[in-house]
């Protein structure tokens, strides 16, 4: 990705989500008014144990993704977490977007950095199923899927997905369509 492309993505992010970096787990606290969480399995079960349950997990992930992004291109943003601020070759990797300090411990040995990579692809159900299955198994974490204007964010995790929409009314409509996938906890977690 060119420097101009990285700058454009950063500007888009800042336009819609200025109070938080593109780190999935940090978005919920900052943008609670447009957030909803869906669980991947009935009764908030966290991990699939057989192929039938994996089918439910993938169906739920893909159902919401399709409602958000049908017929559009999406950005799939994947993180690489390290204790190194930069790798000279990192910026040459296809899709490199940015690096940021995430944990600012006074001891440099405990700093954590997140390096983000972006791939643009046409959305269609099933197109990222391998990635979603790895997320469901907690092999991969921190992935964000957004529209190309970065107005909607889908953040899958092992156990469900956090969704951030442009307005609370849109969030409410999506939440109501999938009310049986919500947590029973008042916090929504």
Image (tube, rainbow, N blue to C red):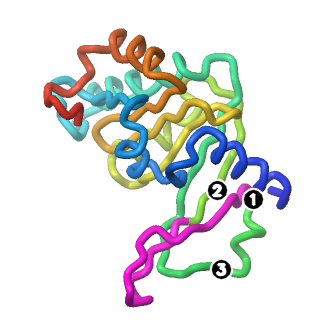
Against 115, is 167 above or below?
A: above
Instruction: Calculate the distance from the C-alpha at mark 1 to the C-alpha at mark 3.
Output: 14 Å
Q: Are marks 2 and 3 in contact (CB under 8 Å)?
A: no
At x 53%, y 58%, the residue is 79
Q: Write down the region rendered in magenta.
A: 94-114
Residue 134 makes an appearance in the image: no
At x 62%, y 23%, the residue is 124
Instruction: Calculate the distance from the C-alpha at mark 1 to the C-alpha at mark 2.
Output: 8 Å
Regarding mark 1 in the picture, which secondary structure is present there? loop
Q: Quadrant of residue 76?
A: top right
Q: Which mark is residue 117?
A: 2
Q: Which residue is mark 3?
A: 87
Q: Which residue is mark 1?
A: 94
Q: Are marks 1 and 3 in contact (CB under 8 Å)?
A: no
Query: 146 or 103: which is nearer to us?
Result: 103
Against 47, is 67 above or below?
A: above
* Mark with earlier residue (1, 3): 3
* Mark with earlier residue (1, 2): 1
Against 111, is 79 above or below?
A: above
Dot 3 alpha-carbon crowd within 10 angstroms: few under 14, some 14 to 19, many 20 or more: few
At x 38%, y 81%, the residue is 105
Position of 2 compared to 180: left or right?
A: right
Position of 35 compared to 99: left or right?
A: left
Against 50, is 55 above or below?
A: above
Q: Which mark is residue 35?
A: none
The N terminus lies in which quarter of the figure? bottom right
The C terminus lies in which quarter of the figure? top left
The percent coordinates of residue 114 (x first, y second) are: 52, 66
User: Is residue 31 on the magenta stretch?
Assistant: no
Residue 95 makes an appearance in the image: yes
At x 58%, y 79%, the residue is 85
């Amino acid at each position: 990705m060119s420097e101009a492309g990285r700058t454009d993505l950063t500007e888009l992010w800042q336009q819609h989500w200025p109070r938080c970096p593109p780190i999935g787990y940090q978005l919920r606290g900052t943008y609670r008014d447009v957030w909803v969480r869906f669980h991947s399995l009935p009764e908030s079960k966290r991990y699939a144990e057989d192929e039938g349950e994996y089918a439910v997990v993938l169906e739920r992930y893909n159902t919401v993704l399709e409602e958000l992004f049908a017929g559009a291109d999406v950005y799939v943003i994947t993180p690489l977490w390290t204790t190194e601020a930069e790798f000279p070759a990192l910026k040459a990797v296809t899709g490199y977007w940015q690096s940021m300090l995430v944990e600012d411990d006074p001891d440099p040995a405990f700093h954590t950095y997140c390096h983000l990579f972006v791939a643009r692809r046409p959305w269609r159900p099933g197109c990222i199923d391998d990635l979603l299955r790895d997320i469901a198994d907690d092999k991969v974490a921190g992935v964000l899927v957004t529209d190309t204007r970065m107005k909607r964010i889908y953040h899958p995790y092992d156990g469900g997905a956090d969704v951030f929409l442009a307005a609370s009314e849109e969030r409410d409509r999506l939440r109501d369509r999938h009310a049986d996938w919500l947590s029973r906890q008042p916090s929504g977690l």
